Image (cartoon, rainbow, N blue to C red):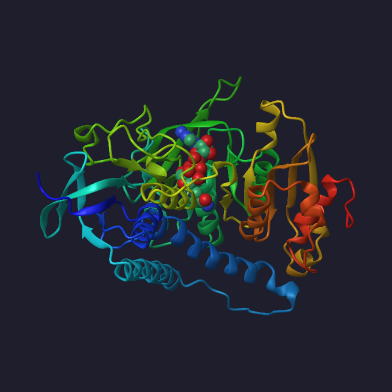
């Protein structure tokens, strides 16, 4: 039997894999990380969260300059967007962060392998790389291979007309007509980017509202806000295919449920973005050779300590069940590695925030009203609109609200939902509050700087107490 070469071999260098590698090295393990791409960082850094945020940030600045600068007294008559510069800056942000991860690998003495890993046993991997093949042994293996865009059978990806988010962050020109299938996080964020740059965007969604997992009131608020920005929606529809017409594409769709008098419709597009979810990425891993089981949806089955059905093989992130979020993978990475080192790693899945980076942003943590009703939990609601927040008014960002859901029996906060400016930052206070099992009274009694956006969170908590001051 060959000698064990590593304490831990990690497959995938996304937020799950690279975080695990760093934490394991900090804990004294000898770590190998195998990544098929030459750039570290995984989907989040290379193709997802980071490039999309770079584009969202730039295009939001552009649309604010166009729509609001006049009212602020700022005159700029020659406003134009230079698309190549925008895309190059996005690439630079990605490259800077990828280099940062590479630097952290060097600093922590993590050994990096470029190539595709396949399991050849419960402690052995085969790596097929650009400079040849290699084999390595490790006491433990952690699979953090993430996910890939899901394809619609009626609309297979071709990379130019029918694209996934991978291509939608790098379109060489602004499409005249963009059809987006799916009103989830990716659909809404990338619709916002290209709509702000001048594309006519139509979104086709199978569900009856945007963001099916979000609180219904918030999803509808988001829909209203985006419609005002010019996005068009068709809800409760099923896409059945494409038709080519005069060099353009017609996306064909029908009502999801038979509706009297409603038959097939179509909408024309020069680009169709399919954003209907992601699937776990396990291609080439040869899980069966090591006895690693997957469920019916292809997700690797793990126990509460992220152990798979194979001894010494673990899995975290998008490739297992749960929310497909970078920060969920990061938390799992730290916890699983700490457990390997005999520490008490733990993830509180009840306090993982979700954010959609549109304008306004939507962020939430904990339960939605729909979930509480389904569980028959007696809950109360405290709400505060940004229209009554002085800082939001100064910023001219008054759309949206904060909604706090609390337990009627003991006042404990059960969920916080924020549609409004900087919701992605504001939600952190709510996450911390829930992590410490705060009551709405705790939030209401906490001093908040004036004037500031977080005051809206406190006011919603005051509303939960029946004593809001500013509305
Ligand atoms: P998603 O699951 O968030 O949304 C997919 C949407 O497509 C849903 O609204 C669904 O009802 C709809 N849909 C499904 N099948 C359809 C069909 N045949 N026709 C029309 N609509 C259909 O998935 P998405 O947006 O692709 O994102 C993938 C993953 O990445 C998600 O887990 C998401 O949470 C995560 N993500 C998170 C972001 C963030 O935190 N800001 C940003 C982007 C992605």
- Classify the position of the C terminus by image quarter: bottom right
Left or right: 461 in relation to 297: right
The answer to which of 263 and 293 lies nearer the viewer is 293
The answer to which of 287 and 453 lies nearer the viewer is 287
Place residue 39 in its image quadrant.
bottom left
Q: Residue at x 34, y 51 (%)?
A: 160
Residue 434 in sight here: yes
Residue with the most extreme front position: 342
Left or right: 230 in relation to 301: right
- On the image, the x and y values in percent for residue 27 come to 37, 59
- On the image, the x and y values in percent for residue 411 come to 78, 41
| In the rendered image, the vertical position of residue 70 relative to residue 411, given as above or below | below
Q: Residue at x 61, y 41 (%)?
A: 214
| In the rendered image, the vertical position of residue 96 relative to residue 176, given as above or below | below
Q: Residue at x 27, y 46 (%)?
A: 140
- Classify the position of the N terminus by image quarter: top left
- On the image, the x and y values in percent for residue 351 come to 59, 46
Residue 245 in sight here: no
């Amino acid at each position: 039997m060959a000698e064990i070469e590593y304490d831990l071999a990690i497959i995938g260098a996304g937020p799950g894999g690279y975080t695990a590698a760093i934490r394991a090295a900090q804990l004294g393990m000898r770590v190998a990380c195998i990544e098929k791409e030459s750039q570290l960082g995984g989907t989040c850094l290379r193709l997802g969260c980071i490039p999309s945020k770079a584009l969202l940030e730039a295009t939001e600045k552009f649309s604010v300059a166009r729509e609001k600068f006049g009212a602020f007294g700022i005159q700029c008559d020659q406003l134009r967007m230079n698309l190549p510069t925008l895309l190059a800056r996005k690439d630079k942000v990605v490259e800077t962060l990828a280099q940062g991860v590479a630097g952290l690998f060097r600093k922590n003495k993590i050994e990096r392998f470029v190539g595709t890993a396949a399991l050849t046993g419960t402690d052995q991997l085969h790596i097929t790389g650009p400079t040849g093949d290699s084999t390595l042994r490790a006491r433990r293996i952690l699979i953090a291979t993430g996910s890939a865009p899901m394809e619609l059978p009626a609309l297979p990806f071709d990379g130019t007309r029918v694209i996934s988010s991978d291509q939608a962050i790098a379109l060489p020109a602004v499409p005249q007509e963009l059809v987006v299938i799916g009103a989830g996080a990716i659909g809404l964020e990338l619709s916002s980017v290209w709509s702000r740059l001048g594309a006519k965007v139509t979104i086709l969604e199978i569900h009856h509202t945007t963001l099916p997992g979000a609180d219904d009131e918030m999803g509808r608020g988001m829909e209203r806000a985006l419609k005002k920005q010019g996005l068009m929606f068709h809800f409760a529809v099923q896409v059945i295919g494409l038709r080519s017409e005069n060099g353009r594409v017609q996306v064909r769709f029908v009502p999801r449920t038979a509706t009297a008098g409603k038959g097939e419709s179509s909408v024309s597009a020069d680009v169709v973005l399919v954003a209907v979810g992601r699937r776990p990425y396990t291609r080439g891993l040869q899980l069966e050779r090591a006895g690693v089981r997957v469920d019916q949806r292809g997700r690797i089955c793990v126990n509460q300590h992220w152990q798979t059905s194979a001894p010494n093989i673990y899995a975290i992130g998008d490739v297992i069940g749960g929310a497909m979020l970078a920060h969920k993978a990061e938390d799992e990475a730290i916890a699983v590695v700490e457990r390997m080192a005999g520490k008490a790693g733990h993830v509180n899945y009840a306090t993982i925030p979700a954010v959609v980076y549109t304008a306004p942003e939507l962020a939430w943590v904990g339960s939605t009203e729909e979930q509480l009703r389904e569980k028959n939990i007696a809950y109360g609601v405290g709400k505060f609109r940004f229209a009554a927040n002085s800082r939001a008014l100064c910023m001219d960002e008054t759309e949206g609200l904060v909604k706090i859901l609390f337990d009627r029996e003991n006042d404990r906060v059960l969920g916080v939902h924020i549609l409004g400016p900087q919701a992605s930052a504001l939600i952190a206070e709510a996450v911390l509050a829930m992590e410490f099992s705060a009551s709405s009274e705790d939030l209401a009694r906490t001093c908040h700087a004036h004037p500031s956006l977080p005051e809206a969170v406190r006011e919603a908590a005051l509303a939960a107490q029946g004593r809001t001051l500013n509305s």
